[in-house]
Amino acid sequence: MAAESQFRTKSGGTVLFGRRLLTCPVCGWVHYAMTPEEKEAGDRLPERYQFTAAERLMYESSFRQCLRCESPAADFRIAGERDLARAHGHLVTPVYVEPEAGMN
């Protein structure tokens, strides 16, 4: 199973398909890279809900760091087989990274 193809649940169902899976180098948490379309859709929420500047900053930064330990997403690497095996049983969360990120 390649880190860029799919992630399967314990019951065998596909959760993600065609996604770049990334791992936090600090805590090992697995994330999936958001598409530009997902990021664009998310960018409309702060406007819709009239976030303050501080709320907008918090919202945007939440997609640029590890959900578990808050390490910067720019430091993530492509998830390997061992990372994916550890990810079974936990939520694989979204992160927004530049297209070349995760290649470390």
Image (spheres, rainbow, N blue to C red):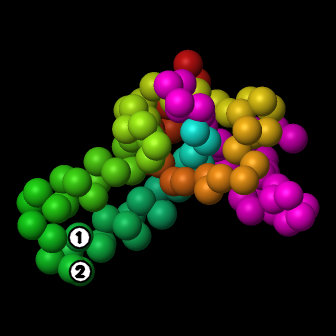
Give the quarter of the figure containing the N terminus: top right
The residue shown at (28%, 54%) is: 60
Q: Is residue 49 within the magenta segment?
A: no
- Main SS, magenta region, reads loop
60 displayed left or right of 67: left
Residue 27's label in the rendered image is none
Q: Going 39% across and 32% down the picture, which residue do you hit?
A: 71
Q: Position of residue 3 (x, y in %)?
A: 74, 38
Q: What element does badge 2 sit on?
A: helix
Amino acid bearing label 2: Arg
Indicate the quadrant where residue 56 lies.
Answer: bottom left
The Cα–Cα distance between marks 2 and 1, rounded to whole angstroms, is: 6 Å
Q: Is residue 83 visible?
A: yes
Q: Is residue 15 magenta?
A: yes
Q: Residue at x 31, y 65 (%)?
A: 43
On the image, which quarter does residue 77 sit in?
top right
Circles 2, 1 touching at the beta carbon (< 8 Å) = yes
Q: Residue furthest left?
A: 53
Residue 17, quarter of picture? bottom right
Q: Which mark is residue 46?
A: 1
Is residue 102 visible to the viewer in this orientation of the structure? no
Q: Residue furthest bottom?
A: 48
Local SS, label 1:
helix
Q: Nearer the viewer, residue 27 or 72?
A: 27
Note whether 104 is above or below 54 in the view shown: above
Name above or below for residue 84 compared with residue 6.
above
Q: Residue furthest top?
A: 104
Q: Which residues are magenta?
A: 1-28
Task: Answer left or right for 42 relative to 92.
Answer: left
Which quarter of the figure is the C terminus placed in? top right
